[in-house]
Image (cartoon, grey):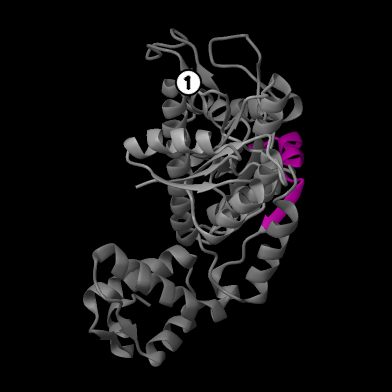
Amino acid sequence: MSKILLIDDERSIRISLREILEYENYEVLEAQDGIEGLQKIKEEEFDLVLCDVKMPKMDGIEVLEQAKNLEKCPQFIMISAHGSIETAVEATKKGAFDFIPKPPDLNRLLLTVRNALEKKQLVNETKILRGKLSKKFDMVGNSPALSRVRDTIEKVAPTDARVLITGQNGTGKELVAHWIHQKSRRIEAPYVAVNCAAIPSELIESELFGHEKGAFTSAHKQRVGKFEQAQGGSIFLDEIGDMSLSAQSKVLRALQENVINRVGSDKDIKVDVRVLAATNKDLKKEIESGRFREDLYHRLSVILIQVPPLKERKEDIPLLIEKFLGDISQENGNAPKKIHPDAVKKLQEFPWTGNIRELRNVVERLVILGDSTISLEDVKKYADY
């Protein structure tokens, strides 16, 4: 049952609103002024607050401002008999969901309450999903090499600087891109990832920039590309070293002018997108070979982040193993298996040419094939080294 707080200095208004809301099966509490209302918000958790604007002691706008600084702030609907466009604009700018004049229209009031509660639910679900996503994308380890990467992310993320992430396959380049977006000012906007190596060269431009109906044989309808989908947010171009020269030139224009064209159209479309790119190739060698544009390289590499291979951060392997054991058991609905210290020590000795991805695969194999406590013998038998 959703919990609503009514803050109004007029007792008759509180009574009538309470009757209406309780009839709709909401739990309703009251406060007769802003100070009492703010105290209740601090002491209890509400889903929604209906707050009068003009009140003695503390007006509704001040209640809203102070509530927004709390760790858990409910949705606010402001109500007032002295409402004006300026007051409504001020309230919404400060974070109110909506503004309703007195006396409130019953249908509009109930619709606004339902919409505000739905938004509250969506915000909560988003926080839960982000928490799960963050756990999935944990950067595990305390090695100096990984700490340097974390420090760079902290400095770079709040800016709009383009970032080129380099490193071997399986080192976690996508994790770096994910955290740059998560810690950026664009976190509320989309994050769109594109694996350039997985898209045929003849389709990459359509994938990135979209196409118009009839632009080519199979273009049966208009399509919005990844750059437009990422509007206001970040686009992650993974394995950009595999992108065709033709597509590279269009990406370069997007970076220079913040403009793209769909395939089959000359119409300019303005885009506001932060570009994060990654590659396992030596792009300077690719430039020398004529396979990568030097001007695009310089546009992309405002900030360079080199993700270390696992062999350079072997002290992180025990923590990674512990994480993978927990993740795999959760995926399969089983209790986490334990691993003997001798087995961990042996795993630390391997070269891990496939890096973290390979380590994860080996741990999963040991969970499936090993004993209840994974032993040194299990590692020797199943680890393929």
Q: In the rendered view, does 274 fall on the left or right side of 193?
A: right
Q: Residue 205 colored magenta?
A: no
Q: In the rendered view, does 239 fall on the left or right side of 124?
A: right
Classify mark 1: residues with Cα within 10 Å, few (<14), some (14-19) or many (20+): few
**Residue drawn 73% across the image and 47% down it:** 57
Q: In terms of depth relative to the viewer, which is nearer, 102 or 240?
A: 102
Q: Position of residue 182 (x, y in %)?
A: 60, 50
Q: Position of residue 276 (x, y in %)?
A: 64, 43
Q: Position of residue 63 (x, y in %)?
A: 66, 46
Asked if residue 8 is positioned above or below residue 205 in the image, the reply reads below
Amino acid type, mark 1: Asp
Residue 241 appears in view = yes
Q: Position of residue 175 (x, y in %)?
A: 54, 56
Residue under label 1:
105
Q: In terms of depth relative to the viewer, which is nearer, 174 or 26?
A: 26
Hey, which quadrant is residue 323 in on the image?
Answer: bottom left
Residue 289 appears in view = no
Q: In terms of depth relative to the viewer, which is nearer, 207 or 189?
A: 189
Split into 4 quadrants, where in the image is the C terminus? bottom left
Q: Residue 301 colored magenta?
A: yes
Q: Residue furthest front?
A: 12
Asked if residue 248 is positioned above or below residue 359 in the image, the reply reads above
Hey, which quadrant is residue 329 in on the image?
Answer: bottom left
Magenta-highlighted residues: 289-305
Q: In the rendered view, does 51 fall on the left or right side of 156?
A: left
Q: In terms of depth relative to the viewer, which is nearer, 25 or 116?
A: 25
Q: Residue furthest bottom?
A: 342
**Residue drawn 76% across the image and 35% down it:** 295
